[in-house]
Image (cartoon, rainbow, N blue to C red):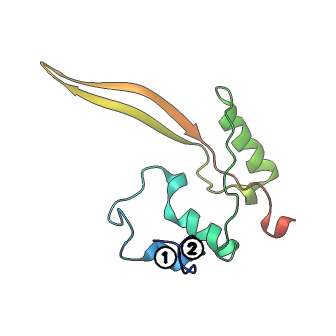
């Protein structure tokens, strides 16, 4: 339903940036926990692609400490390709277990660095 432009069964239309701000948007009162899933990124992508579909994400798994090393390299050589100047984001998964005592348990963490794959206009 959130795709606009197609009429009739089986047709797919284009999602327009204005659609993200509709009152029907789920969780509009909630702030996105993961910065890389923020709606502003989708809006930027759709505006850059004039509402057309496209490939938006490449993901790579790297070893311990490599995200920070990659960020430093981008800061020096390609700062304009960094999505955020904040650099590497760390998200920790922790749980609170309540029983006889209350204990907070760290389940693990993940580090994410968002960069653009190429300059605007492909240059």
The quarter of the picture where residue 29 lies is bottom left
- Residue furthest out toward the front: 9
Residue 54 drawn above or below residue 62: below
Task: Give the quadrant of the N terminus.
Answer: bottom left
Q: Residue at x 49, y 76 (%)?
A: 19
* Pointer 1 with pointer 2, Cβ within 8 A: yes
Q: Are there few (<14), some (14-19), or many (20+) residues within 10 Å of tag 2?
A: many
Residue 91 drawn above or below residue 120: above
Task: Give the quadrant of the C terminus.
Answer: bottom right
- Residue furthest out toward the left: 100
Measuring from the top left, give residue 37's x and y in whole percent.
51, 55
Residues 16 and 101: in front is: 16
Q: Is residue 77 left or right of residue 24?
A: right
Per the image, the residue denoted by label 1 is: 19
Tell me the distance, in whole angstroms, between the alpha carbons under discs 1 and 2. 7 Å
Measuring from the top left, give residue 59's x and y in whole percent.
67, 43
Q: Is residue 30 left or right of residue 64?
A: left
Measuring from the top left, give residue 51's x and y in whole percent.
64, 75
- Say what secondary structure mark 2 lies in: loop
Q: Residue at x 57, y 81 (%)?
A: 5
Q: Are there few (<14), some (14-19), or many (20+) residues within 10 Å of tag 1?
A: some
- Say what secondary structure mark 1 lies in: helix
Q: Residue at x 79, y 54 (%)?
A: 78
The quarter of the picture where residue 14 lies is bottom right
Could you say which disc has been placed on residue 73 in the image? none
Q: Is residue 46 left or right of residue 33?
A: right
Measuring from the top left, give residue 69's x and y in whole percent.
72, 36
- Residue furthest out toward the top: 100
Q: Residue at x 74, y 57 (%)?
A: 81
Per the image, the residue denoted by label 2 is: 15
Q: Is residue 5 left or right of residue 69?
A: left
Marks counted in the figure total 2
């Amino acid at each position: 339903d959130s795709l606009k432009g197609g009429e009739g069964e089986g047709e797919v239309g284009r999602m327009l940036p204005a659609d993200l701000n509709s009152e029907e948007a789920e969780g509009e009162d909630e702030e996105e926990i993961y910065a890389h899933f923020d709606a502003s990124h989708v809006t930027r992508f759709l505006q850059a692609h004039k509402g057309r579909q496209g490939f938006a994400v490449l993901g790579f798994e790297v070893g311990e400490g490599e995200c920070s090393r990659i960020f430093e390299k981008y800061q020096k050589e390609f700062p304009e390709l960094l999505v955020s100047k904040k650099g590497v984001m760390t998200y920790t998964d922790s749980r609170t277990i309540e029983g006889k005592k209350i204990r907070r348990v760290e389940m693990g963490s993940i580090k994410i660095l968002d960069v653009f794959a190429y300059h605007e206009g492909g240059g």
